[in-house]
Amino acid sequence: MAMVKEEVQNRNQQPHIAFLSSPGMGHIIPMVELVKQFVDQHGFSATLLTFSNFSSPTQSDFLASLPPSIYSVSIPLISLDDLPSSSNIETRLCVLIHRSVPHVRPILQSLHKSNKLVAFVPDFFCSDTLPIAKELSIPHFLFVPTNLAFLAFMLHLPYLDETTTCQYHDLPEPLHLPGCVPLWGKDFIDPARDRNSEVYKWILHLAKGYVNAEGFLLNSFEKMEPETAKAFRDGKFGPQPAYAIGPFVRSDMGEADEFGCLEWLNKQPDNSVLFISFGSGGTLRIEQIQEIAFGLEESGQRFLWIVRTPSDTEKNGTFFGLGKQDSPISYLPEGFIDRTKEVGMVVPSWAPQVKILSHKATGGFLLHGGWNSTLESVTHGVPMISWPLYAEQHMNTVMLSEGIGIALRPKESEDGIVERGEVARVVRNLMEGVNGKRMRSKVKELQEAASSALAVGGASYQALEEVANKWKQNELVSE
């Protein structure tokens, strides 16, 4: 059983918050950024609970770098050996967290006894742990590291499940949620693609658990989703308040530039380079890697492409780390690098994304529609091509392309491949077309709105301050 060390037990001079992040750096990074907001701006101390399962050297180094006011506690390894090897990521995460409840309980009890524990904040995969806080009379909010539209969908999912019987992709009409862009079934979250699957049952279970939250904290901001935010304020999704307190994105963190990306960007004209990366977890089919290469070549545009080893079976094959990355460059078409060396740079596996997006030469971002990368692009004023792979990325892409209008969405063929001609078309459209210019202007507006939201007195700052004051007041009442 994980023990809360004496250092945490004796930390009783500041109001204390316990946070719980599900596994994966894509979940841990936004959670840590949230923790820093409470610690740096509002004088809290914090304990961050993480899982030993699916840990990595990157995660360990990251947690070791946290400031002294944020203490990290690791939940012991939990056996998942009985799960079929074919179980997907979401199923494994849900089962892991469900089985972790007996381990989380004594940690919260110890923190509650020895610290001024004023709140418990698990992330959106961890709704099974909310009843523990309720039993201990600890205020408990759920952290949703994505957008209000996703939260709206999850809160509506139990009703949708009760009132329909067909597969969601067979629904005759799009789903019209208050304040949200209409959403066809084919663009629902990935675990809802098959209602007969094990992963759907688990995601539905999580969604039903959201009712146990006293409120929600989201990594979004009002100007990004104004109509959805209004719908939540008007109680369209229930009585629980939803606080848009973002956008907070990862900082530079001194990431090394092993392959000289920034030096190469320094030689390129302003706003001329398309940055291509499918996130820390995304993987493409071999055929798709080839089609992207030919499409980039046909487009004639400058590009900086992070290539990872493809997978013909999984779209999220590197979610818990890069794993085996045998010469990803070798999967490119023969002669491609030589033919494009004047306009393109290809980097295997990894590059400092924040530094690249903030560079003046970067004029577009082809990404997977993940919310962390989306917010990084918005906060640096870079328009996008959103190419969804898994999780809620299809929903995000609909919002970005059809709702906000800051991204293009490439069209897939019947076999799920985006062909080279389509790649070339959307790349040219973004980098030099009329649509690209319009999106560049819109994303610059959102960049300014994001900065204003986080500034003292801004909407996100005030929302976070309201929550912080509520929890501090609870502390005074309990004393």
Image (cartoon, rainbow, N blue to C red):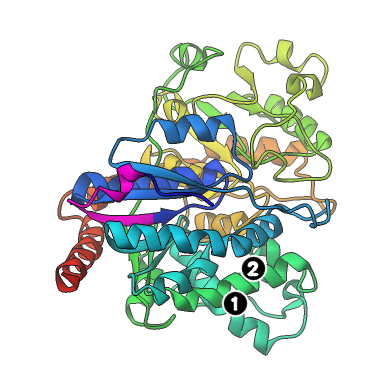
Residue closer to the observer: 367 or 426: 367
- Tell me the residue at 84%/41% (across/down): 312
Disc ID at residue 203: 2
Residue 280 x, y percent position in the rendering: 60, 37
User: Over which residues does the magenta segment extend?
Assistant: 6-18
Q: Residues within 10 Å of mark 1 (few under 14, many from 20)?
A: some
Mark 2 and mark 1 in contact? Answer it, CB < 8 Å.
yes
Residue 102 lies, with reference to residue 161, above or below; the image says: above
Residue 29 x, y percent position in the rendering: 45, 42
Q: CA distance from mark 2 to mark 1?
A: 9 Å
Residue 191 x, y percent position in the rendering: 69, 63
- Tell me the residue at 39%/30% (across/down): 65
Q: Is residue 12 magenta?
A: yes
How many numbered marks, from 0 up? 2
- Tell me the residue at 79%/19% (across/down): 330
- Tell me the residue at 70%/45% (across/down): 316
**Rendering quarter of residue 244:** bottom left
Residue closer to the observer: 62 or 74: 74
Q: Amino acid at mark 1?
A: Leu
**Rendering quarter of residue 220:** bottom left
**Rendering quarter of residue 115:** bottom left
Q: Residues within 10 Å of mark 2 (few under 14, many from 20)?
A: many
Q: Amino acid at mark 2?
A: Ile
Q: Which residue is mark 1?
A: 157
Is residue 444 visible in this depiction of the protein? no
Horizontal side, residue 326 vs residue 457: left or right = right
Residue 302 lies, with reference to residue 32, above or below; the image says: above
